[in-house]
Image (cartoon, rainbow, N blue to C red):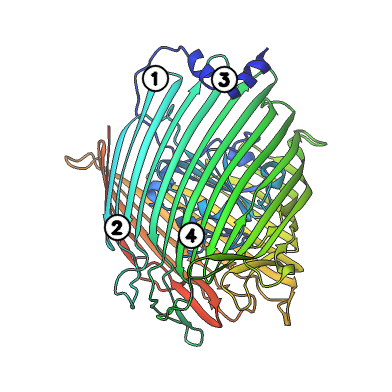
Amino acid sequence: MKVYAFLGALVFPSYLLAAVTVPDSTSRKSVMLDEVVVTSYKEKKTLREVPASISSISLGDLNKKNLVDFKELSSYIPNLFLPDYGSKLTSPIYIRGIGSKLTPSVGLYVDGIPFFDKSVFDFDMNEVNRVEVLRGPQGTLYGRNTMGGIINVYTKNPLDYQGLTYKQMVGNYGQTQFSGSYYGKLSDRVGYAVSSRYKHNDGFFVNAYTGSEADNLNQISSKGKIQWKTESGWDGVFSVNYEYTDQGGYPYGLLDNTTGQIGDVNYNAYSSYRQGVLTSGLSMSYSFDDFVLKSVTGYQNLDDRQAIDQDFTAEAKAFVIQTQKQNQFSQELEMRSKDGKRFTWLNGLFGFYQTGKRMVLYTTQKDYDEPSYGLAAYHQSTLKDFLLKKLSLTVGARFDYEKAKQDYIVWKLSADQKEQTTRLNDSESFTQFTPKVSLQYQFDASNMIYATTTRGYKTGGFNISFSTEDERTYSPEYSWNYEVGGRFSAFNNRLYGDLALFYIDWRNQQISHAVANKTGSMLTNAGKSYSKGVELSLNARPADMLNLQFTYGYTEAKFREYLYGDADYSGNYIPYVPQQTLMLGGDYTWNLSARYVDRLIFSAQYTATGRHYWNDSNDVRQGFYGILNGKLSAVKRNLTVDLWIKNAASKEYMAYFFQTSGKYFAQKGKPLTFGTTISFTL
């Protein structure tokens, strides 16, 4: 009967809300904790018990480090790199050298809802409670396109946070933000939240041709959430988010590769990107006597338009318009055993259906209809006290099936009509088995070592730009990931950290190239590649009011065998992969209890990105560079005033590079910015 009730609640979620009849309670203020105790990892283990390389940034750390945009996470986490493409159209993510400019190699989940498309990765970070980064292939539990890892983002829980918050930020370059949120309760077990944010900047780079900023931004986002927890064992959350962005972009200048100098932005036509994204999700679980049954339903709609001066010169050569409309549906059913047993297990089913329509308008019009769907089944189990006490064995397996279609039409355009010249219609199917084996020895609650072997997989697909028929498709890529690591603590947990070493054997790597004699990029497959390295994270509290953090990542990622046309790139470094990432930071709190100030909090971070190459031939590179950020917060009861600065030393660096029509173009990194933020809570 309980199973039928669960299935009925999937169809009629209002059944759950009507069943909740718990007396009201008084609201209480939220409490921020710096240390994350429980992870969202599907086995529901504590962070220090998971046999994988994981980093977590709590709400307190996000505030102290003033991380308000998704791309600002780059280099704060070992071996995580997020280059700045110049607009939200694409947000490539690289972990341990694995990533792609065109199709995601790292998975992103927000409140358990998968984000599949690169165009939605740079999402609004307002009301985020915690960010987790799981490095290494996560395909066994998370599925498609998680070759490099998974980023899990969780927004605030209205059962834990109550009250009204208003926040306002002003800064140089016309930076302005207004945000407000309200968290309330209908009862002890039902909470709700609404929030909204408006964000603007005038732009950081001037287009010399037009005399105005090239990369101005206007963005508005709104979120709503209702969360409930019943005495009978039902838990659930329903959320809906909408974000609209209207921005200029692509502040690229001509690169002199001899001197490394990047010229001014100088193109004749204003380039822009507009995007609307609607995301909603329903997550419900029911706790039976021996297991927990969970359902996660997600929907996402993307509607965008890119207009770009694709020759990036003062001449009117190539102005391209691209639009896309996508609808994505996903459903996951998961059954897992209760915690605290010697043998624990997890079974799951996952399915998705995605529709996608694109239009590219240049000298011709190209229309793409790209529906796809996929199904997967997975299992993972853990046996504790395996052969030895405190030794655990984890095995997992997943089977994925995916089918992708593409209907491609080319229209010849004239003054008064268009004529169809090409039509291609094709489909491809992909299947893959991804196993995982892990051994873990848990000395105590805070100290452990582990060894893991995991299969990585990324699906193939269709290019939207190509010159010849054989370039229209690309094949899946595969990897084997070998990792050893551990977590440790000392001095009564005043010092704790983790260390991991990894080696990735990579086959059929998907590499992006400029299309010969045309605009746009496409994917092809390299032969063999590898990536190896180390990751270290340290957290220390030498005094009660002083916190220190240090993270370091080293990656060597190279092509073993890679021939493309007449070129042989074997032995070269894989592009977009920093050899090092580093973060050294800390914060100190003064409890003053003065008339106008209760406490002062000072925080500062130095983040560094190591040498990396921008193309397969390794003739364009960015050397090691570091960025210094800082923030001073004054708190008086419910009022907080922040003074912050980013790139305090005005470090110049190359944030992005590409090649088109035989020329090199690059984007400079963001200049020194500063401002103040005022927030008030009730």
Q: Residue furthest right?
A: 387
Residue toward you, 22 or 60:
22
Coordinates of residue 29 in the picture (x, y in percent)? 34, 29
Residue toward you, 265 or 601:
265
Question: Of callouts 4 and 3, which one flags the residue occurring earlier in the amino acid sequence?
Answer: 3
Q: Is residue 411 visible?
A: yes
Q: For mark 3, give the secondary structure.
A: strand
**Residue ID for mark 3:** 234
**Residue ID for mark 1:** 186
Which amino acid type corresponds to the residue marked 4 in the rendered image?
Met
Coordinates of residue 230 in the picture (x, y in percent)? 52, 17
**Label 4 vs label 2, nearer the camera:** 2
Q: For mark 4, give the secondary structure.
A: strand
| Res 180 quadrant in image | top left
Depicted 118 relative to depicted 575: above or below: above
Q: Is residue 34 visible?
A: no
**Mark 3 vs mark 2, CA separation in Å:** 44 Å
| Disc on res. 175 | 2
Question: Of callouts 4 and 2, which one flags the residue occurring earlier in the amino acid sequence?
Answer: 2
Depicted 472 relative to depicted 190: above or below: below
Q: Residue furthest bottom?
A: 258
Coordinates of residue 544 in the picture (x, y in percent)? 40, 43
Taking 424 as reference, is 360 left or right? left
Which amino acid type corresponds to the residue marked 3 in the rendered image?
Trp
**Label 4 vs label 3, nearer the camera:** 3
Which amino acid type corresponds to the residue marked 1 in the rendered image?
Leu
**Mark 1 vs mark 3, CA separation in Å:** 16 Å
Question: Of callouts 3 and 2, which one flags the residue occurring earlier in the amino acid sequence?
Answer: 2
